[in-house]
Amino acid sequence: ARMAPTYRLQLGAAGSSSAIDVARRVGLPEAICVRATELAKNAGGALAQALVAANAERDRAERERDAHAAAARAAEEELAKIREERAAFERTRRHEELKFREALRAELEFARAQLRELSETLRKQSSHKVVDKATEDLAVRIHEQAQAERAVRDALAGPLAAGPVKIEPGARVKLARLDAVVEILERDGDEVVVSAGSLKMRARVDELLPVGNARGAPKRELKSAQDKQADHLARAAASAAKPFSVASPKVDVRGKRAEEALRELEQTLDRATRQGEGFVLVVHGHGTGALKAVMREYLDRSPYAAAHRPGESHEGGDGVTVVSLA
């Protein structure tokens, strides 16, 4: 048998006497023990009752403590399970994204091969109809590939948005409208003033999204190599297509704030699309280049735009953007 105590010592705690129980164990006749127990029932008075109540309360507190400890252990186990599930999801997400990017890279290589083949064909043929049809088909194909990559990348990245948006001056957040990281300058109710480089604009709080490491994040997310390749091919195909007509719609956003300029651009694109126009000329000027960057960043994601390019010298140069409508 183990020589271990069957009791727990509590220093400074009052308790009732166990003398009769001890006497019974060491051999005192049972009749004497029973008689002693009967006599002791009414001998303690209020003090004995208080000790009994204290013992009961102590037992209840110990049971509650044990229950809380069990609940804490269960919570820790659940948290560990959630962390493991999240890690497994992240591994799966990265694997799927890698597979998609490999497939897209193959598609873009095929598109480049088509472009080289097209260029060779154009050198041998002089038909404008062949040029227009081939370049239009290629621009549509490249645009669909770029749109598909952005859609899948957004779907893969969506569940990993972490934590609530911190709305306070100096915080860096992602502005969904521009798909860029901006800095909050001030807050006015449900609106904030943000800066993207040297450009300042107003935005609604519900347009802001959290970023992974706000303090160290760059002011604008860099495009992937696949995005750049797709943009380059799309612009090359669009430039070779039918030239921009002076009768096409034009929107002049020079001197306007970013949100106002984006609103006017979207209205013009919508109206031109419904009217069956083929092109829209966006006049944004040179300036610091911030407004031009915002306009072209929006056009990269706009469903109205099949492709866009800087203007030629006779169209206004880099101070304008020619948009080919989808």
Image: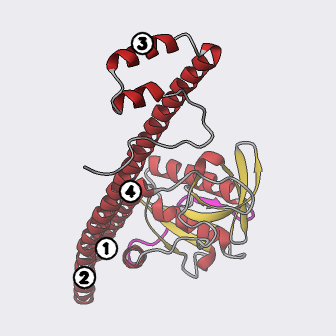
* x then y, percent, for residue 68: 47, 38
Residues at discs 3 and 4 in contact (Cβ within 8 Å): no
Looking at the rendered structure, the kind of residue marked 1 is Thr
Q: Front-most of 45 and 192?
A: 45
Give, as a three-letter code, the residue at label 2.
Answer: Leu
Is 296 rendered above or below residue 257? below
Element assignment for label 2: helix
Amino acid type assigned to the residue bearing label 4 in the image: Arg
Decide: is 201 above or below 120: above
First reached walking from the N terminus: tag 3 or tag 4: 3
| Residue under numbered circle 2 | 118
Q: Disc 4 marks which residue?
A: 83
Q: Is residue 246 magenta?
A: yes
- Using a 10 Å C-alpha cutoff, classify the residue at mark 4 as few (fewer than 14 neighbours), some (14 to 19) or many (20 or more): few
Report crowding for label 2: few under 14, some 14 to 19, many 20 or more residues within 10 A (C-alpha): some
Task: Please name the residue shown 37% across and 63% down the image.
Answer: 153
Q: Are marks 2 and 1 in contact (CB under 8 Å)?
A: yes
Q: Nearer the viewer, residue 24 or 168?
A: 24
Relative to 131, is 314 on the left or the right?
right
Mark 1 surroundings: few (<14), some (14-19) or many (≥20) residues within 10 A = many
Residue that label 1 marks: 135
Who comes first in sequence, dot 3 or dot 2?
A: 3
Residue occupied by mark 3: 35
Count of numbered marks? 4
Q: Quick one: 16 or 23, which is closer to the camera?
A: 23
The magenta region covers: 240-255
- Circle 1 SS class: helix
Q: Is residue 148 shown to the viewer in this render?
A: no
Disc 3 residue crowd, few under 14, some 14–19, many 20+, Cα 10 Å: few
Task: Using the image, tell me which numbered label, if any, was put on residue 84.
Answer: none
Quick one: 251 or 67, which is closer to the camera?
Answer: 67
Which SS class for mark 3? Answer: helix
